Image (tube, rainbow, N blue to C red):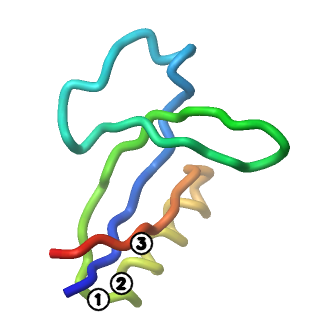
Amino acid sequence: MLAGAIAIILATPADAGSEPVRDLIHTTACTEGDSWRFEWRVQLGIFTNDDRAYDFMDDLIARGVAAEIYFTEL
């Protein structure tokens, strides 16, 4: 089963100052723009209902939080 997971961007590693210590926090490569950058991400939740996942992401974005959905297998 595929599920949508919500992640928020915390900071670039240069700004974070510490290593992630849990599986829910991880680095990822971002190819936005012309250069690669790495970001810390935090998984906020796993939703089996896509509509709920997108609604939650939209609420975060409306509050100014950089959020995205990625899909994972349960």
- Give me the disc on residue 29: none
Give x and y (percent) for residue 53: 38, 77
The answer to whether mark 1 and mark 2 are in CB contact below 8 A is yes
Residue at 56% in and 14% down:
14
Identity, as a three-letter code, of the amino acid under mark 3 = Phe
Residue at 58% in and 61% down:
61
Q: Looking at the image, is mark 1 or mark 3 earlier in the sequence?
A: 1
Residue at 56% in and 33% down:
38
Identity, as a three-letter code, of the amino acid under mark 1 = Asn
Question: Which residue is the site of mark 3?
Answer: 56
Q: CA distance from mark 2 to mark 3?
A: 6 Å
Disc 2 element? helix
Question: Which residue is the site of mark 2?
Answer: 52
Say left or right for 37 vs 53. Answer: right
Q: CA distance from mark 1 to mark 3?
A: 11 Å
User: Farthest residue in the top direction?
Assistant: 17
Question: Which residue is the site of mark 1?
Answer: 49
User: Mark 1, mark 2: which one is toward the viewer?
Assistant: 1
Q: Dot 1: within a 10 Å radius of its alpha carbon, few (fewer than 14), some, or many (20 or more) residues?
A: few
Give x and y (percent) for residue 54: 46, 79
Disc 1 element? loop
Q: Name which quarter of the figure residue 49 lies in.
A: bottom left
